[in-house]
Image (spheres, rainbow, N blue to C red):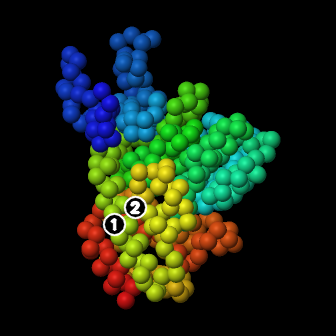
Amino acid sequence: MAIGFSTRAIHNGEEPDFRAGASGDVAVPIHLSTTFARLKAGSPTAGYEYTRSLNPTRKALEEKLASLDGAKYGLAFSSGLAAASTIIISLLKAGDHVIGFDDLYGGTRRLLSNVFVNFNISVSYVDATVPENIEKAVKPESKLIWIESPTNPLLKIADIRAIAKIAKKHGLILVVDNTFLSPYFQKPLDLGADVVVYSTTKYIGGHSDALGGSVVLNNEEYYKKIAYNQNAVGAVLSPFDSYLTLRGAKTLAVRMEQHQKNALALAEFLQKSPKIKRVLYPGLKNHPHHDIAASQTTGFGGVLSFELEGTLADAENFLSKLKLFSTAESLGGVESLAEIPAIMTHASVPKEVREKNGISDTLIRISAGIENTEDLIEDFRKALE
């Protein structure tokens, strides 16, 4: 029987165990043991040897993560960047070339440009809102395309279907960071992506209390390589963080609906203010990529960005006046957050690159929480005044 998203989010990976000696837990318990005893030296008990290699709580989460994307395989990592790093070391080698969206999360860009460049992996950044730019950047040594949609922090949209066709034409691997929308609003594998990566710290965990990352995919060859290196490198999610993420994922659907409701209301409010230069949110019909977003998603998410009139000092002053929005990095938690990418999440991106891409000193990124909509709008109104 086919079951819906919320049903899978609650039940998959957490089916009660009624075998002899089992307790029928409705919620998967936290298995803290780092090693597992055997009756016979050559036979691991139920496949468990050492918790880095496999842990019952993490296994339950990985099954749930795969089910949410409609994927065959899911893997849970100690952070989103740990997941990204493991993808790269598993699927690329020295001399390979990556094509990346020019508006990527600062940590991903730092990883590609400042870390893996030392291992002779090169990267070219292009405006992937125009699929032809991807094709023009293909080289004989190109192996992988890395995109976000929406991007961080400019909320650009990539046509995932079109880029997937280009990837297949040239024999490239398409990786999509789907953190901003979660599998509730967008399923990149269904659009042609080969690998999907998440920071589960954000919407999937949803409560700003569990660091984590995940990889979901259908390709068995890629899965075996990434799973091997997950164990070999050891960047695995802890049992406790796996438990917290399992718990958070159960309410993903209802949370995403409220995140979206609040983000759209804030975006519409900001559009009317003379103190705002521009508002970036794909759910607005005047967003340049609204139609593409609507064609490949079932919602527009809870993140928006906007640019204030004035200077960096004005942007900092605005944030200091907010009462319900904490000035903090990250996003996707139940509480609302605000940040200035130029001096926070994207500070590691060179200033000239930030400005070229449109990340000004007065650009503010908002993660709309699930508070009462009217309260968030009133908080913005007072801070602008």
Q: Is residue 5 above or below residue 50?
A: below
The image's mark for residue 302 is 2
Q: Residue at x 72, y 39 (%)?
A: 170
Q: Closer to the camera, 356 or 237?
A: 356
Q: Is residue 5 above or below residue 202?
A: above
Residue flagged by tag 2: what amino acid is it?
Gly
Residue flagged by tag 1: what amino acid is it?
Asn
**Mark-to-mark CA distance, 1 and 2:** 7 Å
Q: Secondary structure at mark 1?
A: helix
Residue 300 placement, left or right of 95: left
Q: Point out residue 298 in the picture as x, y percentages from the top left corner.
A: 41, 51
Q: Residue at x 40, y 61 (%)?
A: 302
Report the number of discs: 2
- Given the current orientation, which residue lies at the most extreme right position? 140
According to the image, label 1 marks what residue?
Answer: 262
Q: Residue at x 21, y 34 (%)?
A: 26
To which quarter of the image does residue 311 belong? bottom right
Q: Point out residue 161 in the picture as x, y percentages from the top left corner.
A: 58, 45
Q: Is residue 219 above or below residue 134?
A: above
